[in-house]
């Protein structure tokens, strides 16, 4: 079982990002203190592993690196990729579904535990 669960759409999107970044070695996720609710997810394509990162391979061979200081926030986390259409605009983004969240700010960029 992986530390973080990904939908197939999220894996496909991240793998496309890795293909575009020829120096990218994998997907890294951490949390930082920010925003009106307190914390924000920090997804990134990385070119080198940070010392202490927890590494695992998700479905389809996706290399994933997790900041060990953020690990407590990720239990049962699911990362999805969605395409939303409205008002003539199409928005594509990663969505974080975390049962540990107690709330989100109005803009959806930050969360509380």
Image: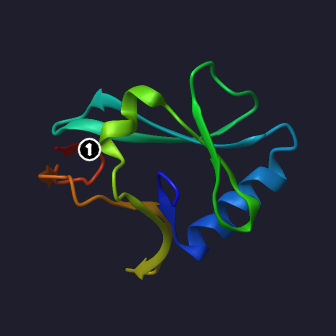
Q: On the picture, is 99 further left or further right than 11?
A: left
Residue drawn at x 62%, y 18% is: 51
Q: Tell me if mark 1 has few (under 14), some (14-19) or many (20+) residues whose alpha carbon lies within 10 angstroms of its own.
A: many
Residue named by callout 1: 110
Q: Quadrant of the C terminus?
A: top left
| Relative height, residue 64 to residue 77 (above, below) | above
Residue drawn at x 68%, y 69% is: 12
| Relative height, residue 39 to residue 49 (above, below) | below
Which sits in the foreground, 82 or 106? 82
Total marks shown come to 1
Residue 106 x/y as whole percent? 16, 54
Q: On the picture, is 40 further left or further right than 58?
A: left
Res. 34 image quadrant:
top left
Q: Residue furthest front?
A: 1
Which sits in the foreground, 85 or 82? 82
Q: On the picture, is 59 further left or further right than 90?
A: right
Residue drawn at x 16%, y 39% is: 37
Residue 1 x/y as whole percent? 51, 61
Label 1 secondary element: loop
Q: Residue furthest left?
A: 102
Residue drawn at x 29%, y 58% is: 98
How was the colour assigned to the protein in this rendering? rainbow
Residue 23 x/y as whole percent? 85, 37
Q: On the picture, is 86 further left or further right than 83?
A: left
Residue 53 x/y as whole percent? 57, 29
């Amino acid at each position: 079982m992986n530390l973080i669960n990904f939908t197939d759409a999220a894996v496909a999107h991240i793998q496309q990002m890795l293909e575009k970044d020829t120096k990218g070695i994998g997907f890294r996720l951490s949390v930082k203190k920010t925003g009106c609710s307190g914390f924000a997810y920090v997804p990134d394509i990385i070119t080198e592993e940070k010392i202490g990162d927890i590494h695992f391979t998700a479905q389809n061979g996706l290399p994933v690196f997790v900041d060990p200081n953020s690990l407590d926030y990720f239990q049962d986390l699911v990362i999805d990729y969605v395409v939303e259409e409205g008002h003539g605009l199409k928005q594509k983004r990663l969505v974080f579904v975390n049962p540990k969240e107690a709330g989100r700010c109005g803009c959806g960029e930050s969360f509380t535990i």
